[in-house]
Image (spheres, helix red, strand yellow):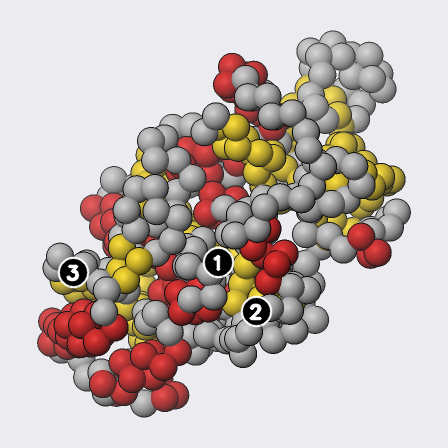
């Protein structure tokens, strides 16, 4: 029986909250940093999901989002490379609809059930933007969830599914639109959310011969907290059966939202419980999972809880607006237009820049980054083994602060990082507070954007302070 064998998540460090000057909302929401997008968050969630797992076993990767950085180029291939997965796997982007996350999850379950793959990774990630100070912006959030679907060591086995597909023009974003648009509220609620979700959930119950009392947790999509309560009540579920939608702490994360709520429900670790995840968008997917005895023994990374409890409130809405180019002009130092990166060089340096591989000398064990033909320690030539450094902990050996650099986040922090197994790199630091940087500081590596020039999204690894729950 196919099911979930591992899960992980990622929520950005920064939040807009009551303490953020100019935010003017009692709700808190997660906010991607200026160098984060759906791809970088997907990589972070993938790392969280893959902790202590053999990456060589992954046979495929499905990436679900409504905010891909490229309109024509597969993002799943970038993510698979950054996660250092095998080259002989299948990858696909599932996009343009809010229920893309559950669609990807069902596709992976079908692949494993059919036997065409043994282990498929599903990652849903989104960073949707609403108009400034509008309802969509207040209720949205940024984040990602990742799952490994297999038929081995299952922590939650598949327990049925039901899908409705219907053309519904209630929320949309055309090519070139920076913000999500929506139609009249009453129409969207009555003819969209309430009618379609009621039909989808009742259809699942009838198909699987279940009653609402059989469901332990309902991970339910909703655009905001008020309608979430109304929908759950309308569907006949008691408050204790409904998974906390995390409005006021995280917000609606688009295609990733129902999967992040599913991950949060699985963190409870209780076996023999039926969990439903319900998505919405041009119809609805309802997926059921029954937790097994393995769930109480399964370990996982930071997860939803860890990332929620390790956030930090932004000082002002102005900072967020500058990150997103919402309505403020850039007041940083003027610089010549950045030069377009060489696509040839990017391809040639994939191993060191995207997979983030160093090399271990087979003679003396010395680790170098980037990999060199000659070991600087024992001068052995062409005798080394690649080592992945992206998931290695490190410490700051030294650092500098550049207050004149033309960067969104001044000052630009540059650090020399020593990795615990060995090896050293010079890189930027992000998600950092200047007064907290110090020599010996524990850091980890994070996949981020360097810049976007001529439509080319140039990704690289940066150091970030180690996230810890408060």
Q: Are marks 3 and 2 in contact (CB under 8 Å)?
A: no
Q: Which residue is mark 1?
A: 142
| Tally of numbered discs | 3
Q: Are marks 2 and 1 in contact (CB under 8 Å)?
A: no
- Tell me if residue 128 comes above or below residue 385 in the rendering: below
Q: Which mark is residue 338?
A: none
Q: Is residue 343 left or right of residue 306?
A: left
Q: Is residue 168 visible?
A: yes
Element carrying mark 1: loop
Determine the residue positioned at 46% across, 61% down: 132
N-terminal of the pair, mark 3 or mark 2, is 2
Q: Nearer the viewer, mark 3 or mark 1?
A: 3
Q: Which residue is mark 2?
A: 23
- Tell me if residue 417 comes above or below residue 38 in the rendering: above
x then y, percent, for residue 152: 38, 53
N-terminal of the pair, mark 3 or mark 1, is 1
> Quadrant location of residue 212?
bottom left
Element carrying mark 3: loop
Q: Which mark is residue 168?
A: 3
x then y, percent, for residue 156: 36, 65
Which one is nearer the viewer's eye here, 325 or 387? 325
Q: Is residue 419 left or right of residue 140?
A: right
Q: Nearer the viewer, mark 3 or mark 2?
A: 2
x then y, percent, for residue 127: 45, 53
State how far apart marks 3 and 2 are (Cα): 32 Å
Element carrying mark 2: loop
């Amino acid at each position: 029986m196919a099911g979930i064998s591992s899960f992980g998540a990622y929520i950005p460090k920064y939040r807009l909250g009551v303490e953020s000057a100019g935010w003017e909302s009692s709700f808190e929401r997660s906010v991607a940093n200026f160098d984060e997008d759906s791809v970088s968050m997907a990589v972070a969630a993938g790392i969280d999901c893959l902790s202590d797992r053999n990456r060589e076993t992954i046979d495929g990767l499905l990436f679900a989002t409504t905010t891909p950085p490229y309109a024509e180029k597969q993002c799943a291939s970038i993510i698979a490379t950054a996660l250092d997965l095998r080259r002989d796997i299948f990858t696909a982007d599932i996009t343009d609809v809010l229920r893309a996350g559950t669609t990807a999850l069902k596709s992976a379950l079908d692949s494993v059930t059919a036997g065409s793959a043994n282990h498929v990774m599903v990652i849903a990630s989104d960073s949707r933007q609403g108009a400034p100070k509008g309802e969509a912006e207040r209720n949205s959030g940024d984040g990602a969830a990742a799952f490994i679907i297999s038929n081995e060591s299952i922590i939650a086995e598949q327990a049925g599914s039901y899908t409705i597909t219907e053309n519904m023009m209630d929320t949309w974003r055309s090519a070139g639109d920076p913000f999500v648009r929506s139609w009249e509220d009453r129409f969207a609620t009555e003819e969209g959310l309430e009618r379609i979700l009621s039909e989808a959930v009742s259809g699942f119950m009838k198909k699987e011969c279940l009653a609402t009392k059989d469901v332990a947790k309902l991970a339910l999509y909703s655009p905001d907290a008020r309608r979430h309560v109304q929908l759950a009540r309308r569907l006949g579920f008691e408050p204790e059966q409904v998974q906390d939608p995390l409005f006021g702490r995280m917000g609606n994360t688009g295609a990733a939202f129902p999967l992040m709520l599913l991950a949060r429900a699985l963190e409870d670790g209780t076996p023999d419980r039926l969990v439903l995840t319900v998505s919405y968008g041009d119809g609805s997917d309802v997926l059921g999972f029954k937790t097994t005895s393995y769930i109480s023994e399964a370990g996982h990374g930071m997860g939803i809880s860890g990332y929620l409890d390790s956030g930090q409130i932004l000082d002002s809405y102005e900072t967020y607006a500058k990150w997103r180019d919402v309505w403020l002009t850039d007041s940083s130092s003027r610089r010549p237009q950045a030069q377009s990166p060489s696509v040839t060089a990017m391809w040639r340096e994939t191993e060191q820049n995207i997979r983030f591989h160093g090399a271990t000398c087979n003679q003396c064990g010395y680790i170098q980054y980037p990999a060199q033909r000659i070991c600087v320690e024992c001068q052995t030539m062409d005798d080394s083994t690649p080592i992945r450094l992206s998931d290695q902990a490190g410490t700051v050996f030294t650092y500098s602060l550049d207050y004149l650099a033309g960067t969104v986040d001044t000052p630009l922090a540059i650090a020399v990082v020593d990795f615990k197994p060995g090896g050293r790199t010079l890189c930027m630091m992000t998600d950092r507070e200047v007064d907290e940087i110090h020599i010996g500081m524990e850091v980890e590596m994070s996949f981020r954007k360097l810049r976007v020039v001529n439509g080319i999204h140039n990704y690289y690894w940066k150091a970030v302070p180690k996230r810890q729950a408060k």
